[in-house]
Image (tube, rainbow, N blue to C red):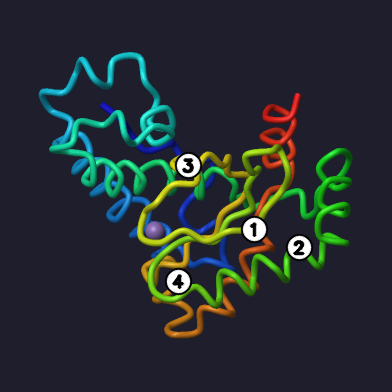
Amino acid sequence: MYDKIKLSYEYNELEPYIDGLTIETHYGKHLQTYVNNLNALLEGYGEFIEGKTLEDILSNTNSIPEKIRQGVINQGGGVANHNFYFSILSPKPKNAPEGKLLEAINNKFGSFEAMKDKINNASIGHFGSGWGWLVIDERGGLEVITTINQNSPFSINKKPLLTIDVWEHAYYLKYKNVRADYVKNIWNIIDWSKIENLYEGYVK
Ligand code: MN
């Protein structure tokens, strides 16, 4: 059985950047549906999931029994991606990276601002539903990517550091069709202390 993370903030605490009703619906309804669907799919597959995190499973999608493979990619990705998304948001975030992570960002993208532009452009320009990401690639370097639907970076051998959910349900109540404003505003609540910790854990 897999579950959603516990939020470290109240639904309305990310306002004005993301409104309370959006978080309540996104976390309480959309994410819960992915959790329920995933656990229903995995009924009878206890041996397969024994001892595995969802990230373990998504890292090796070929090992998923064929009958439920695409379902687990969709529903399991939905759980893992959302848990990750909600975990890096905070009403009192550290607004910029420092130390080793900042160094890596400067080396790869030129500056923190240039990296944000790259993620913004990728996320805003992504056609249809999906996710914008900052990831660690196969060789340990930083990379900006997008994934479609609920596809997980773990499935293509990349480790997520930051994500922006660009499914309409993530922003439609407040921002309507204007995805760009949601994407630009989310930087106000992305907590770089969490991302620094992830980075240090991955590159140590
Ligand atoms: Mn979502």
Q: Which numbered disc, 2 or 1, marks the residue that appears first in the sequence?
A: 2
Q: Amino acid at mark 4?
A: Tyr
Gap in Å between the C-alphas at discs 3 and 1?
Answer: 26 Å
Label ID, residue 171: 4
Gap in Å between the C-alphas at discs 3 and 2?
Answer: 27 Å
Q: Are marks 2 and 1 in contact (CB under 8 Å)?
A: yes
- Displayed-image quarter of ligand 1: bottom left
Which tag is nearer the camera, tag 3 or tag 1?
1
Q: Amino acid at mark 3?
A: Leu
Q: Amino acid at mark 2?
A: Met
Task: Give the percent coordinates (x, y) of residue 204.
Answer: 76, 24
Q: Secondary structure at mark 3?
A: loop
Q: Which numbered disc, 3 or 4, marks the residue that appears first in the sequence?
A: 3
**Closer to the camera in the image, 143 or 176:** 143
Q: Which numbered disc, 1 or 4, marks the residue that appears first in the sequence?
A: 1
- Residue sitting at x 45%, y 71%: 171
Q: Secondary structure at mark 4?
A: loop
Tell me if mark 4 has few (under 14), some (14-19) or many (20+) residues whose alpha carbon lies within 10 angstroms of its own. many
Task: Give the percent coordinates (x, y) of residue 61.
Answer: 34, 36
Gap in Å between the C-alphas at discs 4 and 2?
Answer: 22 Å
Task: Identify whether 56 is placed above or below 115.
Answer: above
From the image, tell me which residue sits under label 2: 115
Which tag is nearer the camera, tag 4 or tag 2?
2
Tell me if mark 3 has few (under 14), some (14-19) or many (20+) residues whose alpha carbon lies within 10 angstroms of its own. few
Gap in Å between the C-alphas at discs 1 and 4?
Answer: 21 Å
Tell me if mark 2 has few (under 14), some (14-19) or many (20+) residues whose alpha carbon lies within 10 angstroms of its own. some
From the image, tell me which residue sits under label 3: 7
Q: Are marks 3 and 2 in contact (CB under 8 Å)?
A: no
Label ID, residue 144: 1
